[in-house]
């Protein structure tokens, strides 16, 4: 998935969590991995969405399976693979923030 598709998809999931009608919304995550030379890059970003709809983007310098277990244990609504290199981590975070304003 390209960078723009990832930004749109992450934004859609966060917005849908805001509009959820579940009686007891839970925390969820939306992990995004990146590629480097057509292989999984040594880094990822995880959007942690709280039950109240607020979110935080956490960038890691390691692959998703190697990040903090407590974050991986949170239900993830989707898992995206971005076909761009790690230099798109911060632009992705910024694009999601802009789309959610």
Image (tube, rainbow, N blue to C red):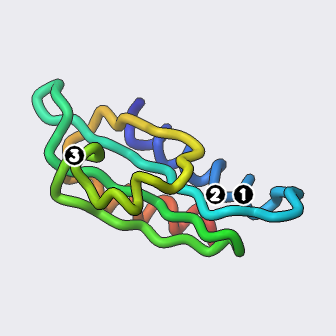
In the rendering, at what x and y percent does residue 97 appear? 51, 68
Name the residue rendered at 51%, 56% in the picture.
74
Q: Earlier in the sequence, mark 2 or mark 3?
A: 2
Q: Earlier in the sequence, mark 3 or mark 1?
A: 1
In the rendering, at what x and y percent does residue 28 appear? 58, 57
Q: Residues within 10 Å of mark 3 (few under 14, many from 20)?
A: some
Total numbered labels placed on residues in the image: 3
The one nearer the camera, 69 or 21, is: 69
- For numbered disc 3, what is the local secondary structure? loop
Mark 2 and mark 3 in contact? Answer it, CB < 8 Å: no
With 2 as the anchor, is 26 left or right in this view?
right
State the residue position of label 3.
63
Name the residue rendered at 17%, 25% in the picture.
38
In the rendering, at what x and y percent does residue 48 appear? 50, 64
In this picture, is 80 found above or below 13?
above
Report the mark closest to the observer, 2 or 3: 3
State the residue position of label 1.
17
- For numbered disc 1, what is the local secondary structure? helix
Separation (CA) of disc 2 from disc 3: 22 Å
Separation (CA) of disc 1 from disc 2: 5 Å
- For numbered disc 2, what is the local secondary structure? helix
State the residue position of label 2.
14
């Amino acid at each position: 998935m390209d960078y723009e598709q990832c930004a749109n998809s992450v934004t859609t999931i966060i917005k849908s969590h805001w509009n959820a009608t579940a009686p007891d919304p839970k925390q969820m995550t939306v992990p995004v991995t990146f590629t480097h030379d057509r292989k999984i890059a040594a880094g990822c970003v995880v959007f942690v969405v709280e039950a109240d709809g607020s979110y935080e983007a956490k960038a890691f310098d390691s692959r998703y399976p190697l990040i903090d277990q407590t974050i991986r244990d949170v239900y993830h609504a989707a898992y995206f693979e971005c076909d761009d290199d790690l230099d798109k981590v911060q632009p992705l975070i910024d694009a999601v923030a802009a789309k959610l304003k």
